[in-house]
Amino acid sequence: MDYQSAANGQSHEETRQRLAESRSLQRVTTALLQKLTLDQVFEIVRCEARELTGAAGGSIFLLEEDSWLREASHDVSLDPLSARIPVSGTLTGQAVLSGKPILDNAYSNGAVEARTPNVKTESLLSVPLQIEGNSIGALNVANKVGGFTENDVHILGLLADVAAIAIENARLREKAKQLAIVEERQWLARELHDSVTQAMYSVTLYAEATRLALAAGKSDVAAENLQELQMMAREALFSIRLLIFELHPPILEGQGLVAALQVRLSAVESRAGLQTELRVEKSRRLPLAIEEELYRIALEALNNVVKHARAQHVTVTVKFDDDRVYLEVTDDGKGYDSAVARGSGGMGLRGMEERAQRINAKLEMVSAPGMGTTLKVEVLA
């Protein structure tokens, strides 16, 4: 083979390798934008690391506050003996502390981060995962035929830069989701105390009053108490039904916003004696985060209709354009002074505005005494 042919061959191989690097980074970046779960991000990063370097397997360790590294993800071929390893005295820990890749093609089987009972680890490359110069863990690959090269260090370093952002972003999303769950539980506890608990306490009092009236032979008083007791029990049941629909309904995730709204109208508003109508134009699924916020905004508006509006009819309209979604909740109730309600933060308006802001939606509430109320929401989706 002449010099020119060898040079062309080398150039072709370098081009192929750079193309593979670019595609790999693009896949990891796409994972970052798709809002995948943390485990899904781990899987993508490990697979890309293994494919790019030609390693037999890979693993990801995340730094814990107490100077330990927790194994977050691994290939079966590199199943470690322990889910946690110390930062001190390990090659992975050295990479995390120094912020620099550690390569060992004469791997010591005494090191714990890749020791396996069935597979001899012959080589290890550990690259730190860093966010703004701070290590959050390390990306490891092991057992490459012929050992790892400086080019592998370069490739894995590029992947680790993007992977660190994807991993941290997924972790933050999971934390935010947990915080949202805590907030919903706290809200539910307050609602249970403020409405259902008080209603059930009143039921208990009327039941006792009825017992005393019957014991005293006052049947007319007992009958009145029973009527009050029945009414309060119905109110308590209705409040519980409202709270159930405030929780994340499975149908929202499974079938979408329109189906969830239809179930809500049938289960709550219709049973409350309201005439209901759901109008839909060009229905399609939206990202779950947007569907959930729109659903909860609609629920707050519907709760207002049931509790305060004294309406006979309520209409929910959902219109889907190519890049926008419009939601309207309209009732023919007594209405209210918009300026007064906004100034006092009443009608749950503040909460609806906060939810709208989370998805960059426009929200408008139009009402006047005796003229009913209309809620309008517009969002890009």
Image (cartoon, rainbow, N blue to C red):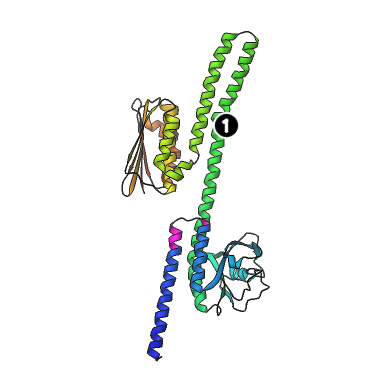
Most common secondary structure along the magenta stretch: helix
State the image coordinates of residue 319 (x, y, percent, origin top left): 33, 42
Please determine whether, in this image, residue 151 is positioned above or below residue 34. Answer: below
> What residue lies at 46% left-to-right and 63% top-to-bottom?
28
Q: Is residue 77 left or right of residue 26?
A: right
262 magenta-colored: no
State the image coordinates of residue 23 (x, y, percent, origin top left): 42, 68
Please determine whether, in this image, residue 149 is positioned above or below residue 347. Answer: below
In the foreground, 149 or 347: 149
31 magenta-colored: yes
- Quarter of the rendering containing residue 72: bottom right
The answer to whether residue 118 is seen in the rendering is: yes
In the foreground, 298 or 23: 23
- Quarter of the rendering containing residue 198: top right
On the image, numbered disc 1 is attached to which residue? 193
Start-end of magenta stretch: 29-38
- Looking at the rendered image, the quarter that the N terminus falls into is bottom left
Q: Label 1: how many residues lie within 10 Å, few (<14), some (14-19) or many (20+)?
A: few
Residue at the outermost front position: 118
In the foreground, 371 or 259: 259
Q: Is residue 110 left or right of residue 310?
A: right
> What residue lies at 48% left-to-right and 36% top-to-bottom?
245
Residue at the outermost bottom position: 2
In the foreground, 238 or 77: 77
State the image coordinates of residue 80 (x, y, percent, origin top left): 63, 65
- Quarter of the rendering containing residue 85: bottom right
- Type of amino acid under label 1: His
Q: Is residue 37 left or right of residue 6?
A: right
Please determine whether, in this image, residue 207 is positioned above or below residue 96. Answer: above
